[in-house]
Amino acid sequence: MIAPLDTTTIIPGLLDFIHVRNSGVAFGILNEARMPERLKSILTTALATCALLGIGLYARHIRQHEKLARVGLSLILGGAIGNLIDRVRVGYVLDYVDVYWRGWHFWAFNIADASITIGAILVFVDLLLVTPHASHSV
């Protein structure tokens, strides 16, 4: 186990494991918000729950043959549920993957975040490139 804010190098100059407690939302937004931790926990949990409900409603409109979108939404839902469980259970999400290269440094993230990102890419690819969407005339 890595202590909070400590790192272990996996691939020098590219990848570390780090221990970051993300009490905010995506990309650490609200991490530095000046509000009681209990209120921040309630707010971030409510936001995550609303996002899950929205994704669930959107998923109802995906047709059976839109397999790429279905896989993408499954990845998004799985990652979002995993992060929500952590928020409810311990009040934060543990981010532990730290990717960087030269002067460029990405936000720390976890496997659930990666799943959400890959899922979103798959949904967009399906929407933009795979599934034909006909315009409806008025």
Image (cartoon, rainbow, N blue to C red):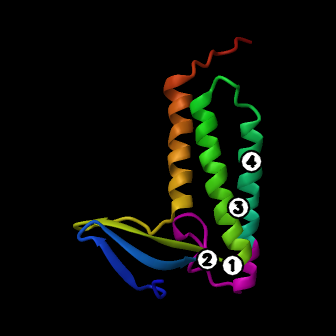
Badge 3 crowding class, 10 Å Cα cut-off, few under 14, some 14 to 19, many 20 or more, is some
Q: Are marks 2 and 1 in contact (CB under 8 Å)?
A: yes
Residue pushed farthest top?
A: 137
Look at the image and say whether residue 40 sits in the magenta stretch: yes
Badge 2 crowding class, 10 Å Cα cut-off, few under 14, some 14 to 19, many 20 or more, is many
Q: Is residue 3 above or below residue 44?
A: below
Q: Return the disc, 3 or 2, that comes first in the chain's sequence.
A: 2
Q: Which residue is mark 4?
A: 54
Q: Secondary structure at mark 3?
A: helix
What's the distance in space between the residues labelled 1 and 4, CA to CA? 22 Å
Q: Residue at x 60, y 29 (%)?
A: 67
Q: Which residue is mark 1?
A: 91
Give, as a single range, the part of the protein colored magenta: 23-42
What x and y, as percent, mark residue 64? 70, 25
Viewed as shown, does residue 127 lie left or right of 42?
A: left
- Amino acid marked by disc 1: Gly
Q: Residue at x 74, y 47 (%)?
A: 54
Badge 1 crowding class, 10 Å Cα cut-off, few under 14, some 14 to 19, many 20 or more, is many
What x and y, as percent, mark residue 113? 54, 59
Q: Are marks 3 and 1 in contact (CB under 8 Å)?
A: no
Label number found at residue 23: 2
What's the distance in space between the residues labelled 3 and 1, CA to CA? 12 Å
Q: Is residue 36 above or below residue 25?
A: below
Q: Secondary structure at mark 4?
A: helix
Q: Return the disc, 3 or 4, that comes first in the chain's sequence.
A: 3
